[in-house]
Amino acid sequence: MKTSHAPSPTTTNDLKLAYVVMIFAPLFFSTNIIFGRMTITEVAPFTLAFLRWGFCAVVLSPFIFKALEQSLHLIRQRPFMLLVLGFLGMWISGAGTYYSLQYTTATNGTLIYTTSPLMIILIERLIFGRLIRWREMAGILIAFGGVAIIVFQGRLSVLLSGSVNIGDVGFLIAALSWAGYSILFRNKRLASLPIMALFGLICASGTILLFPFALWEWLSGGRMPQTTSAWQGIAGIVIFSSLLAFSGFQYGLRALGASITGIFMYLMPAYGIVLAVLLLGEQIHAYHLAGIMLVLGGVCFATIPGFRRAKA
């Protein structure tokens, strides 16, 4: 008599929940650029990033205190690493993103930011000597061809004139910074601390680095949150774009593994562009469609395992 190996109801329900969570996690991540575009007209960029990560640090502080001994040990042993993570993930990828949204659209920002996985491959090549396979290199070239189409609006005259939108360049820098953050975040030296406590410490680190610049914006008469809509935008960034997005992503990693979770994250450009059209009234042009196909196609081709050979 054969023993049944069917998953228990609890396991099945957990997997179903994980898939549902991972459908929404990319949506939550994509709201950062949307809320940022809506709020940046009322709040200065460094102030917006400072409030975002400051509130996140406060909310995550119970996780830090729960692992207080490990947290203090990491602070004493790796203070520079925590500061670098805060600088890459919260200063450049945070305030830099909001600064760039003053000059470019959420649609452009979403598509350019999608190249971050390719930046990881390039950084690992430059720093760690990682071998780049031909499929990865082809995907990188295809995707950055799509970025060029977006940046130069699909027109040769814009390319020849040398006029580049500073916001688009800012998003390229933010994508590169996020790639560096992602690589450093996986460092084995940080593995001793529970993930939410570690994220809380990084949020606190970013908040500390952002404070002088937010203070400068306030002293120089920069835009401060004074309206209900401004605080609603900040609340959306903190709750949806930060806490729910990150916790949902971590839940997916634990339940489904990195490969499946990573595939779900390719929904971000679709979510971001749809939200930009519906909520911000942005228009999709022909060069956006060409850029979408090249950027998303190149990223998938370079990063999805077995993309060329589907396996049952």
Image (cartoon, helix red, strand yellow):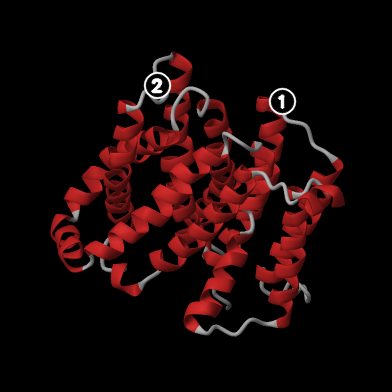
For badge 2, the amino acid type reads Pro
- x, y percent for residue 293: 80, 54
User: From the viewer's perspective, is residue 88 above or below residue 226?
Assistant: below
Residue 155 appears in view: no
Disc 1 to disc 2, how far (Cα)?
23 Å
| Residue extending farthest front | 161
Q: Quadrant of residue 190?
A: bottom left
Question: Along the line of sight, which residue is nearer the eye, 2 or 226?
Answer: 226
Q: Secondary structure at mark 1?
A: loop
Whether residue 64 is visible, yes or no, is yes
Of label 1 and label 2, which has the lower sequence position?
Answer: 2
Disc 2 is placed on an element classified as: loop
On the image, the x and y values in percent for residue 85 come to 36, 58
Q: Nearer the viewer, residue 302 or 42?
A: 42
Q: Is residue 114 placed above or below 230 in the rendered structure?
A: below
Residue placed at 19% from the left, 56% from the top? 67
Task: Name the quadrant of the C terminus.
Answer: bottom right
Residue 57 location (% of width, % of height): 29, 42
Determine whether, in the image, residue 281 is placed left or right of residue 285. Answer: left
Question: Which corner quadrant of the image does residue 308 belong to?
Answer: bottom right
Quadrant of the image containing the N terminus: bottom right
For disc 2, the marked residue is: 225
Q: Residues within 10 Å of mark 1 (few under 14, many from 20)?
A: few
Q: Give neighbour class at mark 2: few <14, some 14-19, many 20+ (Cα, 10 Å).
A: many
For the residue marked with disc 1, what is the amino acid?
Gly
Residue sitting farthest toward the top: 227
Q: Looking at the image, which is closer to me, 301 or 104?
A: 104
Q: Which residue is mark 1?
A: 281
